[in-house]
């Protein structure tokens, strides 16, 4: 699996989680969906856990930015853990810097009513 495919997998999983939340909004409801960081964390964690060491290294090499990963998040107890946690941090940064995910995050900053939820669902499903 390529680094770009991993990013797309994570984005798809995040959008699926958001879509599920949006589908729960009923008419006359207005809800703030503030779980996006949890959705991103879970999707990145699941993706990284399913990759080989070489695929994790490809993420680090392809996207770079490992110097921006909080060094306190890197598990240096073994080389495999250091690579996995670095890949996690790099992929997570890519998700948050992706324009589509950024736009989604901006929309979720506010309370979402039923009509807005329906519009967002259409956009997500495109």
Image: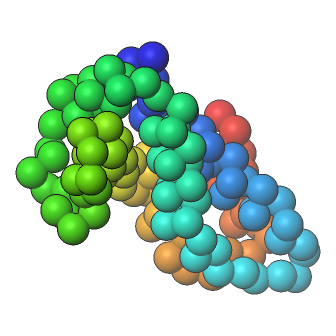
Q: Residue furthest left?
A: 67
Q: Quadrant of residue 112?
A: bottom right
Q: Quadrant of the N terminus?
A: top left
Q: Is residue 99 visible?
A: no
In the depicted structure, whether residue 82 falls above or below residue 105: above
Depth check: give the residue in front, 36 or 103: 36
**Residue beneath the point at 55% across and 66% down:** 38
Q: Residue at x 18, y 28 (%)?
A: 61
- Residue 38 makes an appearance in the image: yes
Whole-percent x and y of residue 111?
A: 63, 81
Q: Residue at x 27, y 53 (%)?
A: 77
Q: Quadrant of residue 84?
A: top left
- Residue at coordinates 56% horizontally, 55% vertically from top-left? 42
Viewer-nearest residue: 88 or 17: 88
Look at the picture and state if 56 lies above or below 99: above
Q: Quadrant of the C terminus?
A: top right
In the displayed orientation, state which residue is furthest to the right: 27
State which quadrant residue 78 falls in.
Answer: top left
* Residue 66 point in image, percent of width and height: 15, 46
Left or right of residue 12, residue 20 in this image: right
Picture coordinates of residue 118, whole percent (x, y): 77, 57
Q: Is residue 110 left or right of residue 83?
A: right
């Amino acid at each position: 699996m390529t680094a770009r495919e991993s990013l797309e997998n994570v984005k798809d999983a995040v959008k699926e989680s958001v879509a599920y939340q949006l589908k729960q909004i009923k008419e006359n409801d207005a809800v703030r969906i503030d779980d996006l960081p949890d959705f991103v964390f879970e999707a990145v964690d699941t993706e990284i856990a399913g990759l080989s060491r070489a695929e994790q290294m490809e993420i680090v090499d392809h996207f770079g930015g490992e110097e921006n990963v909080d060094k306190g998040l890197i598990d240096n107890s073994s080389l495999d853990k250091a690579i996995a946690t670095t890949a996690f941090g790099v992929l997570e940064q890519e998700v948050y810097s992706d324009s589509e995910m950024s736009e989604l995050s901006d929309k979720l900053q506010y309370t979402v009513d039923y009509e807005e939820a329906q519009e967002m669902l259409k956009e997500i499903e495109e």
